[in-house]
Amino acid sequence: MNKFFGLITLFGGILTSGITLANPTEVNLSINRQTSENYEQFVQRAQTLATDTVQQRFKENNSLEELRVLIVGENQGAIAPVLTVQVNRDNWNNEPNVKRWQNLYPYSKDLLGFEQQQAQMTEPTEPASPIPTDEIPASEPEVTPIPGVTPIPTTTIPTTTPTPTTTPTTTTTPLTTPSSTELVPLPSIKVPTTTPPIPLPNQRLQPNRMK
Protein backbone atom coordinates (compact mmCIF):
# COMPACT_ATOMS: atom_id res chain seq x y z
CA MET A 1 0.00 0.00 0.00
CA ASN A 2 2.83 2.38 0.85
CA LYS A 3 4.53 1.59 -2.43
CA PHE A 4 1.30 2.38 -4.30
CA PHE A 5 1.00 5.81 -2.71
CA GLY A 6 4.66 6.38 -3.36
CA LEU A 7 4.23 5.68 -7.06
CA ILE A 8 1.27 8.03 -7.24
CA THR A 9 3.24 10.76 -5.51
CA LEU A 10 6.19 10.26 -7.84
CA PHE A 11 3.98 10.27 -10.92
CA GLY A 12 2.24 13.44 -9.74
CA GLY A 13 5.56 15.13 -9.19
CA ILE A 14 6.67 14.26 -12.69
CA LEU A 15 3.46 15.70 -14.14
CA THR A 16 3.82 18.81 -12.04
CA SER A 17 7.39 19.26 -13.18
CA GLY A 18 6.36 18.89 -16.78
CA ILE A 19 3.57 21.41 -16.45
CA THR A 20 5.87 23.87 -14.73
CA LEU A 21 8.40 23.60 -17.50
CA ALA A 22 5.69 24.06 -20.12
CA ASN A 23 4.29 27.22 -18.50
CA PRO A 24 5.31 30.48 -20.20
CA THR A 25 7.35 33.13 -18.49
CA GLU A 26 5.03 35.33 -16.47
CA VAL A 27 5.54 39.00 -15.70
CA ASN A 28 3.34 40.83 -13.17
CA LEU A 29 3.13 44.62 -13.35
CA SER A 30 0.98 47.21 -11.58
CA ILE A 31 -0.23 50.68 -12.50
CA ASN A 32 -1.84 53.38 -10.36
CA ARG A 33 -4.77 55.46 -11.48
CA GLN A 34 -3.89 59.04 -12.29
CA THR A 35 -5.88 62.08 -11.19
CA SER A 36 -9.20 62.57 -13.06
CA GLU A 37 -8.50 59.51 -15.24
CA ASN A 38 -11.50 57.49 -16.44
CA TYR A 39 -11.56 53.72 -16.88
CA GLU A 40 -11.01 53.79 -20.66
CA GLN A 41 -7.86 55.87 -20.30
CA PHE A 42 -6.71 53.59 -17.50
CA VAL A 43 -7.08 50.49 -19.72
CA GLN A 44 -5.22 52.20 -22.58
CA ARG A 45 -2.24 52.81 -20.31
CA ALA A 46 -2.34 49.16 -19.25
CA GLN A 47 -2.33 48.05 -22.91
CA THR A 48 0.62 50.30 -23.70
CA LEU A 49 2.55 48.91 -20.74
CA ALA A 50 1.83 45.32 -21.81
CA THR A 51 2.91 46.00 -25.41
CA ASP A 52 6.23 47.52 -24.35
CA THR A 53 6.87 44.62 -21.94
CA VAL A 54 6.25 41.89 -24.55
CA GLN A 55 8.44 43.56 -27.15
CA GLN A 56 11.25 44.15 -24.69
CA ARG A 57 11.24 40.59 -23.27
CA PHE A 58 11.25 38.90 -26.68
CA LYS A 59 14.01 41.23 -27.84
CA GLU A 60 16.24 40.74 -24.80
CA ASN A 61 15.79 36.94 -24.52
CA ASN A 62 16.07 35.06 -27.81
CA SER A 63 15.36 31.72 -26.11
CA LEU A 64 12.02 32.94 -24.76
CA GLU A 65 9.23 31.29 -26.73
CA GLU A 66 6.10 32.34 -24.85
CA LEU A 67 5.26 35.15 -22.46
CA ARG A 68 2.35 36.00 -20.18
CA VAL A 69 1.96 39.54 -18.83
CA LEU A 70 -0.46 40.41 -16.02
CA ILE A 71 -1.37 44.07 -15.40
CA VAL A 72 -2.82 44.82 -11.95
CA GLY A 73 -4.52 48.16 -11.30
CA GLU A 74 -4.57 50.16 -8.07
CA ASN A 75 -6.93 52.97 -7.10
CA GLN A 76 -7.14 54.44 -3.59
CA GLY A 77 -6.08 51.19 -1.93
CA ALA A 78 -8.23 48.91 -4.13
CA ILE A 79 -6.36 46.30 -6.21
CA ALA A 80 -7.78 44.28 -9.12
CA PRO A 81 -6.44 42.66 -12.33
CA VAL A 82 -7.01 44.77 -15.44
CA LEU A 83 -5.79 42.52 -18.28
CA THR A 84 -3.48 39.66 -19.20
CA VAL A 85 -1.58 39.12 -22.44
CA GLN A 86 -0.36 35.63 -23.33
CA VAL A 87 1.39 35.15 -26.68
CA ASN A 88 4.29 33.19 -28.15
CA ARG A 89 7.10 34.60 -30.21
CA ASP A 90 5.82 33.49 -33.63
CA ASN A 91 2.33 34.88 -33.12
CA TRP A 92 3.68 38.15 -31.83
CA ASN A 93 6.02 38.53 -34.79
CA ASN A 94 3.15 37.89 -37.19
CA GLU A 95 0.67 40.17 -35.43
CA PRO A 96 2.19 42.45 -32.76
CA ASN A 97 -1.16 43.81 -31.58
CA VAL A 98 -1.81 43.54 -27.87
CA LYS A 99 -5.58 43.71 -28.36
CA ARG A 100 -5.41 40.49 -30.36
CA TRP A 101 -3.83 38.53 -27.48
CA GLN A 102 -5.22 40.30 -24.43
CA ASN A 103 -7.82 39.13 -21.93
CA LEU A 104 -9.69 41.95 -20.19
CA TYR A 105 -11.29 41.77 -16.74
CA PRO A 106 -14.40 43.98 -16.99
CA TYR A 107 -15.23 43.62 -13.29
CA SER A 108 -12.10 45.57 -12.42
CA LYS A 109 -14.00 48.77 -13.23
CA ASP A 110 -16.30 48.19 -10.26
CA LEU A 111 -13.64 46.66 -8.03
CA LEU A 112 -11.38 49.68 -8.47
CA GLY A 113 -14.23 52.12 -7.77
CA PHE A 114 -14.47 53.75 -11.21
CA GLU A 115 -18.25 53.39 -11.44
CA GLN A 116 -18.88 54.90 -8.02
CA GLN A 117 -16.57 57.87 -8.53
CA GLN A 118 -17.96 58.56 -12.00
CA ALA A 119 -21.52 58.51 -10.64
CA GLN A 120 -20.56 61.01 -7.94
CA MET A 121 -19.01 63.33 -10.51
CA THR A 122 -22.03 63.23 -12.85
CA GLU A 123 -24.70 63.41 -10.13
CA PRO A 124 -26.49 66.79 -10.45
CA THR A 125 -26.69 68.94 -7.40
CA GLU A 126 -30.20 70.08 -6.50
CA PRO A 127 -30.54 73.85 -6.12
CA ALA A 128 -31.44 75.10 -2.68
CA SER A 129 -35.14 75.75 -2.31
CA PRO A 130 -35.93 79.45 -1.86
CA ILE A 131 -37.24 80.56 1.50
CA PRO A 132 -40.87 81.68 1.13
CA THR A 133 -41.35 85.33 1.90
CA ASP A 134 -45.04 85.60 2.69
CA GLU A 135 -46.24 89.10 3.40
CA ILE A 136 -47.74 89.46 6.86
CA PRO A 137 -50.94 91.55 6.68
CA ALA A 138 -50.93 94.62 8.83
CA SER A 139 -53.19 94.20 11.80
CA GLU A 140 -55.58 96.98 12.75
CA PRO A 141 -55.00 98.60 16.13
CA GLU A 142 -57.21 97.33 18.85
CA VAL A 143 -59.66 99.85 20.29
CA THR A 144 -60.64 99.54 23.91
CA PRO A 145 -64.39 100.20 24.22
CA ILE A 146 -65.44 102.92 26.66
CA PRO A 147 -68.57 102.23 28.74
CA GLY A 148 -71.55 104.26 27.59
CA VAL A 149 -69.95 105.31 24.28
CA THR A 150 -71.11 103.76 21.02
CA PRO A 151 -68.13 103.14 18.71
CA ILE A 152 -68.32 104.79 15.31
CA PRO A 153 -67.70 102.34 12.47
CA THR A 154 -64.69 103.14 10.38
CA THR A 155 -65.28 103.53 6.68
CA THR A 156 -62.63 102.92 4.13
CA ILE A 157 -62.24 105.76 1.66
CA PRO A 158 -61.28 104.44 -1.75
CA THR A 159 -58.23 106.00 -3.21
CA THR A 160 -58.68 107.50 -6.65
CA THR A 161 -55.91 107.81 -9.08
CA PRO A 162 -55.90 111.26 -10.73
CA THR A 163 -56.27 111.17 -14.47
CA PRO A 164 -53.57 113.19 -16.17
CA THR A 165 -54.91 116.17 -18.15
CA THR A 166 -53.92 116.40 -21.74
CA THR A 167 -52.87 119.79 -23.09
CA PRO A 168 -54.09 120.40 -26.65
CA THR A 169 -51.31 121.02 -29.05
CA THR A 170 -51.67 123.88 -31.51
CA THR A 171 -50.26 123.55 -34.94
CA THR A 172 -48.97 126.75 -36.53
CA THR A 173 -49.06 126.88 -40.28
CA PRO A 174 -46.02 128.72 -41.65
CA LEU A 175 -46.73 131.70 -43.88
CA THR A 176 -45.74 131.13 -47.43
CA THR A 177 -44.24 133.98 -49.39
CA PRO A 178 -45.62 134.10 -52.93
CA SER A 179 -43.12 133.86 -55.67
CA SER A 180 -42.49 136.53 -58.20
CA THR A 181 -44.56 134.69 -60.75
CA GLU A 182 -47.63 134.74 -58.50
CA LEU A 183 -47.59 138.56 -57.90
CA VAL A 184 -50.18 140.52 -59.96
CA PRO A 185 -48.89 143.95 -61.08
CA LEU A 186 -51.03 146.92 -60.03
CA PRO A 187 -51.81 149.81 -62.50
CA SER A 188 -49.68 152.88 -62.05
CA ILE A 189 -51.56 156.05 -61.02
CA LYS A 190 -50.10 159.43 -61.87
CA VAL A 191 -50.34 161.96 -59.06
CA PRO A 192 -50.12 165.67 -60.08
CA THR A 193 -47.05 167.33 -58.83
CA THR A 194 -48.64 170.76 -58.40
CA THR A 195 -51.68 171.57 -56.36
CA PRO A 196 -53.79 174.67 -57.30
CA PRO A 197 -53.84 177.37 -54.64
CA ILE A 198 -56.78 177.68 -52.41
CA PRO A 199 -58.75 180.83 -53.40
CA LEU A 200 -59.18 183.47 -50.81
CA PRO A 201 -62.46 185.29 -50.25
CA ASN A 202 -63.35 187.82 -52.87
CA GLN A 203 -60.67 186.37 -55.12
CA ARG A 204 -61.27 184.65 -58.34
CA LEU A 205 -59.71 181.46 -59.22
CA GLN A 206 -57.27 181.96 -62.02
CA PRO A 207 -56.23 179.26 -64.27
CA ASN A 208 -52.98 177.58 -63.59
CA ARG A 209 -50.39 178.36 -66.05
CA MET A 210 -48.10 175.77 -67.11
CA LYS A 211 -44.48 176.76 -67.14
Image (cartoon, rainbow, N blue to C red):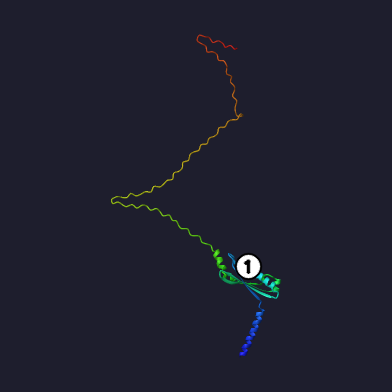
Q: Is residue 4 above or below residue 52?
A: below
- Between 164 and 76, the one nearer to me in the picture: 76
In this view, the residue farthest toward the left is 148
User: Relative to residue 131, is residue 106 drawn left or right?
Assistant: right
Nearer the observer, 204 or 85: 85
Q: For mark 1, does the 10 Å Cα neighbourhood hold few (<14), some (14 to 19), or many (20 or more) residues?
A: some
Residue 164's spot in the image, x, y percent? 46, 42
Q: Position of residue 63 (x, y in %)?
A: 70, 76
Badge 1 amino acid: Arg
Counting labels gives 1
Residue ID at (64%, 84%): 13
Q: Residue at x 61, y 90 (%)?
A: 2
Q: Quadrant of residue 132?
A: bottom left
Q: Nearer the viewer, residue 99 or 171?
A: 99
Q: Residue furthest bottom?
A: 1
The quadrant in which residue 71 appears is: bottom right
Quadrant showing the N terminus:
bottom right
Q: Position of residue 182 (x, y in %)?
A: 60, 29
Q: Give the residue at the far top of this rendering.
A: 202
- From the viewer's perspective, is residue 139 above or below residue 118? above
Reading the image, the residue beneath label 1 is: 45
* Label 1: element kind: helix
179 or 13: nearer the eye? 13
x, y percent for residue 174 = 55, 34
Q: Quadrant of the C terminus?
A: top right
* Residue at the front extreme of this rendering: 60
